[in-house]
Structure formats: C-alpha cells, structure tokens
Amino acid sequence: MYLVSVYFDKASTKKIQTLINQIAITSGNYYMIEKQVPPHMTLSAIETRNVDILIPAIKQLEGKLHSETIQFVTVGQLFPYVLYTMPVLNAYLQDLSLQISNVISDISEATVSKYYRPQSWLPHVTLAKTLSKEEMQRAFSVVQERFSVFQAQVTELGLAKVNPHNDVLRFNLVC
C-alpha cells in the first residue's frame, strides 16, 4: 500500500505531533510513534506491486500544486480503532483530491482504495490508531482537554510506503 499525502508547516506539524505524543502517553497505545507516522493527510491510498509506476505520475504534479491554508475544526473517530482531527473540506482540498485521482487513474496496475476517491474521501489526520475501547476513551480525554481549532499551511506533497511510514517521494508545493 502506498499513500499520496500532504504535509504541513512546521508549527502545525509540531502541534499535531504533540497531540499524537500526548495521546500515546495517556492511552498507552504507541502505534503512531512506533511506526514513525508523521503528521499528514492522505489524499489517496493505492495498491500496486511496484511503486516505480506511481513516481512519474506524482512527479508530474511538482510545480503545479499550490500551498494553501486549511482549518482543522474537529476531532472524530473511525470506529472502532482510529482517532483523528478533521479540516473543513473546502474547494482547495477537493481539487487536490481530484488532481491526484486524475494522474493515477490512467495507471492500470494501480488500484485506489474506495475510501480515497473524489467524492468519497473523508479528509483527516490520524492522531491514533489500533486503539482498544479503553485506549480510545483515554485518547479522547486528551483531545477533549487539549484540542482547539487551528489553521495549517499545506506545504508538501509526498508518496510513501506504509508500515512503517517511508517516504518514496516528497516535494514542496508552490507558494
């Protein structure tokens, strides 16, 4: 599995990573830290045998995608195991999703997850995953106390392998 994701400015990344760390300490679930998952928002999840077929498609977007500010407004759960923070789904995020979909759609050896296709995608940044019921309750207590609405600048696009997270390609978005 490979992910096409966006990454954020340093201050926002630090804020999200702090939440991830606090959730891990309080819940006792260190999955995000142990798997070295950086704060990111996945735009597309792709199954393919060879990442090399994805690289040219993603590289063609370099210099064409712009950096913009998004606003994180809530936290939520993907039952039963995932806790996340979610931004407002605006035209900018919808356009990013569509552009990624467009460059991947012509690759016959790649299959995009049905949860990461345009119009069926829930933009989110995972704060914790593989949580038990008890860990979820402890994790949620952290975000109840420490989460507040914040803005983040989307600054980079990347292609990564999962488990553990390993960047294959990453580039800055146009300012």
Image (tube, grey):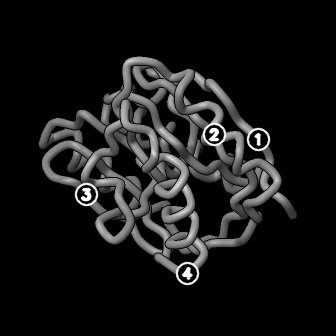
3D distance between C-alphas at marks 4 and 3: 24 Å
Q: Are marks 1 and 3 in contact (CB under 8 Å)?
A: no
Q: Position of residue 155 (x, y in %)?
A: 75, 54
How far apart are the two marked residues, 2 and 1, measured between alpha carbons? Answer: 6 Å
Q: Position of residue 47 (x, y in %)?
A: 34, 31
Q: Which mark is residue 158?
A: 2
Q: Residue at x 70, y 51 (%)?
A: 61
Asked whether residue 143 is in view, the answer is yes
**Tag 3 or tag 4, which sits nearer the N-term?**
3
How many numbered discs? Answer: 4
Q: Which residue is mark 3?
A: 77
Q: Is residue 135 above or below residue 109?
A: below
Q: Are marks 2 and 1 in contact (CB under 8 Å)?
A: yes
**Snapshot quadrant of residue 109:** top left
Tell me if I can see residue 34 in this picture: no
Image quarter in which the N terminus is found: top left
Identify which residue is drawn at 59% across, 74% down.
71
Label 3, residues with CA under 10 Å away: few <14, some 14-19, many ≥20: some
Residue at image location 27% in from the left, 54% down from the top: 115
110 to the left or right of 16: left
Name the residue nearer the viewer: 6 or 65: 65
* Amino acid at the residue labelled 3: Gln
Where is mark 4, residue-wise? 91
The vertical placement of 59 against 96, above or below, is above
Residue marked by disc 1: 171
- Mark before the other along the chain sequence, 3 or 2: 3
